[in-house]
Image (cartoon, grey):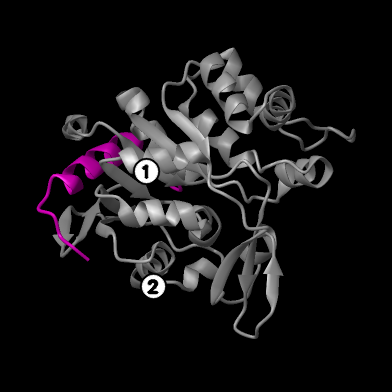
Amino acid sequence: MQHHNLNQYHKIVAIGGGHGLGRVLSSLAFLGSRVTGIVATTDNGGSTGRLRANQDCIAWGDLRNCLSHLAGRPSIGSLLFEYRFEGDSELSGHNLGNLILLALDQLCVRPLEAVNLIRNLLKIETRLIPMSEQPTHLVALSTRGDRIFGELNVDGMSEAPIALSLEPQVDATCEACVAVQQADLIILGPGSFLTSVLPPLLMPKFAQQLAASRAEVIFIDNLAQECSPAGTIDLEQKLAWCHQLIGKPVITKVLCHGEQIRMDGKIGYFPLRSKHSPGLHDRAALADAIAALVTSPRLIA
């Protein structure tokens, strides 16, 4: 195993959402509090979307997902956190973890405090920070000039958008900006590119911190092409999107899935697919690949 090479980093920040970010964070969980996840909060589907419509809260789904990936298994806490109600009642389809986070948010001063309470309950050392503590939605601009409102509708577009924005425009959580300031390694992706990876970069202050950072920045691509408009965006275009939003080229290396280990310029290919869950990255392989990539000669984009 090579992931002990990651011990050289004092502060690692991973940015994204959903299963992709959760997988990265769980693969690096052995580093404890040295790892921080900055989590997208623009989801408007499923249980999260219903809560947002009724309570005007941030999107809890991706935060809950990351907490679930990091929770020790099996445990009563993790099982309860992932429990989904069934039947025909008003609770049907709701995830208990989302409801717990919402309840704690209403009891606390800040959403971040609610997340920290759950981290302590589940004995999670990895830090998790919502990208913003203010509710916002993802908005896309189509090639015809139409505004497409909400993540669900953006994912349902027939072609890739020409621009993305947040509505309303919100401020980045101050702890997220500080985490980027202090980081010596920053990871973008994997995950839904338009709806998980890019939303945090749409906040100007957060993008400015990324542009000013002296950390090494790596991009992790998905295992397979997305079944959404992002599926039409190739790797070079993804990097261009990131750099345009950040304001300058910052990504130095890229990690991709490949059946054989090889380096192609700044791109490293490693076998990353989980044998047990083919749609997900293998945790140990991902940690080893990140370690191997960052210890290879630095290659500027």
Residue 173 lies, with reference to residue 143, above or below; the image says above
Disc number for residue 180: 1
Residue found at the far left of this picture: 297
Q: Quadrant of residue 156?
A: bottom right
Q: Nearer the viewer, residue 39 or 189?
A: 39
Left-right relation of 101 to 253: right
Crowd class of label 2 (few under 14; some 14 to 19; many from 20; radius 10 Å): few
Q: Residue at x 65, y 83 (%)?
A: 145
Q: Quadrant of the C terminus?
A: bottom left
The reply to whether the C-beta atoms of the residues labelled 2 and 1 are less than 8 Å apart is: no
Q: Position of residue 95 (x, y in %)?
A: 71, 32
Left-right relation of 137 to 185: right
Magenta segment includes 294 = yes
Q: Residue at x 20, y 40 (%)?
A: 291
Q: Position of residue 12 (x, y in %)?
A: 31, 37
Q: Earlier in the sequence, mark 2 or mark 1?
A: 1
Confirm whether residue 276 shows in the render: no
Left-right relation of 92 to 178: right
Residue 241 lies, with reference to residue 84, above or below; the image says below
Disc number for residue 22: none
Q: Amino acid at mark 2?
A: Gln
Q: Residue at x 36, y 53 (%)?
A: 210
Confirm whether residue 163 shows in the render: yes
Q: Position of residue 139 (x, y in %)?
A: 64, 65
Magenta stretch, residue numbers: 274-301
Residue bearing mark 2: 237
Element marked by disc 1:
helix
Magenta segment includes 287 = yes
Q: Tell me the distance, in whole angstroms, between the alpha carbons under discs 2 and 1.
A: 24 Å
Q: Nearer the viewer, residue 1 or 191?
A: 191
